[in-house]
Amino acid sequence: AVSANGNGCPPIDIAGGEVPGGEVQLAGDKSSQYLTSILLSAPYFKNDTCIHIQGDLTSKSYADITLDIMKTFGVSVINESYQRFKVKAGDRYNAQTYQVESDWSSASYFLAAAAVTGGEVTLTDINPHSVQGDAQFTSVLEKMGCRVEKKSNTLQIKGNPLKGITINMNNMPDAVQTLAVTALFAEGETVIQGIGNLRIKETDRILALANELTRLGAEVGTGEDYLVIRPGDYRGAEIETYDDHRMAMSFAVAGLKIPGIRIKNPTCVEKSFPDFFQRFANL
């Protein structure tokens, strides 16, 4: 594989042929997506593959999703404490009819809506026991004061007065923006840790959150991998989305409590949730 422009970035020219497999060294501190792509392909490599993770693997929950779906389709992976992953060459996926789960990242905005308004929201056709990392966002809201009731394929949340928490969100990176906005309406400060990889998402999400939360009137502190949010006196504002779908959807939650919020470039939600604002309006 060769970068067409010689700068290490796409477009990339890829020559066909067998992939040898074998021993692979992979940095794990920036993203789990590189691991996922190799794992999914590894059964079709020429030789058995062992992926050695350099450092601590970030966003382990996404690796769990990958391993779970590979197992469902007939390929088992040996996971040695998220430091080594072993895949046998020659294993093959078995075709089947598969029901794709509802997306917990998208659900987080509706859960947060109940949390900040003190209302009730019921989610249907959702798996409360999913391996998706963001399925644990309900536990975060419980720690902040909400009441959650889970059934086989539904979940109900009731908002209560919120309190600030300190939490490591490394396994729920896509829910960080939702939590940050929710924290605006909690009593006391909220400290969100373990989120350094948010700096290399659609935008530098730590910087983007600091900018827009401050614009609304919160007091915000940041570090390389953390965010501290202290409630303040809020005012309406135009929210810059940085062409990041999760910025737009998260700050829509703030609009439920702060009059005068306008979301710039709302069409950026089309990346993951094209009809988000129509569904959100139905609340």
Image (cartoon, helix red, strand yellow):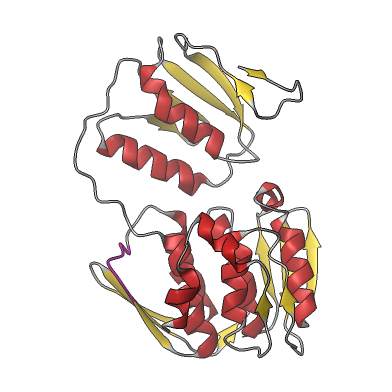
Q: Nearer the viewer, residue 56 or 65?
A: 65
Query: Residue at 66% across / 54% down in the picture?
Result: 195
- Quarter in which the N terminus is drawn: top right
Snapshot quadrant of residue 147: bottom left
Query: Residue at 61% across / 39% down in the picture?
Result: 56
Snapshot quadrant of residue 235: bottom right
User: Chief secondary structure of the magenta span?
Assistant: loop
Query: Residue at 55% across / 47% down in the picture?
Result: 59
Percent of width and height locating residue 198: 67, 53
| Image position of 196 (left or right of 153) | right
Residue 132's place in the image compared with 68, above or below, is: below
Residue 189's place in the image compared with 222, above or below, is: below
Q: Is residue 165 visible?
A: no
Residue 123's place in the image compared with 159, above or below, is: above
Q: Nearer the viewer, residue 110 or 166?
A: 110
Question: Which region shows up in magenta?
Answer: 123-128
- In this view, the residue farthest toward the left is 96
Percent of width and height locating residue 9: 70, 29
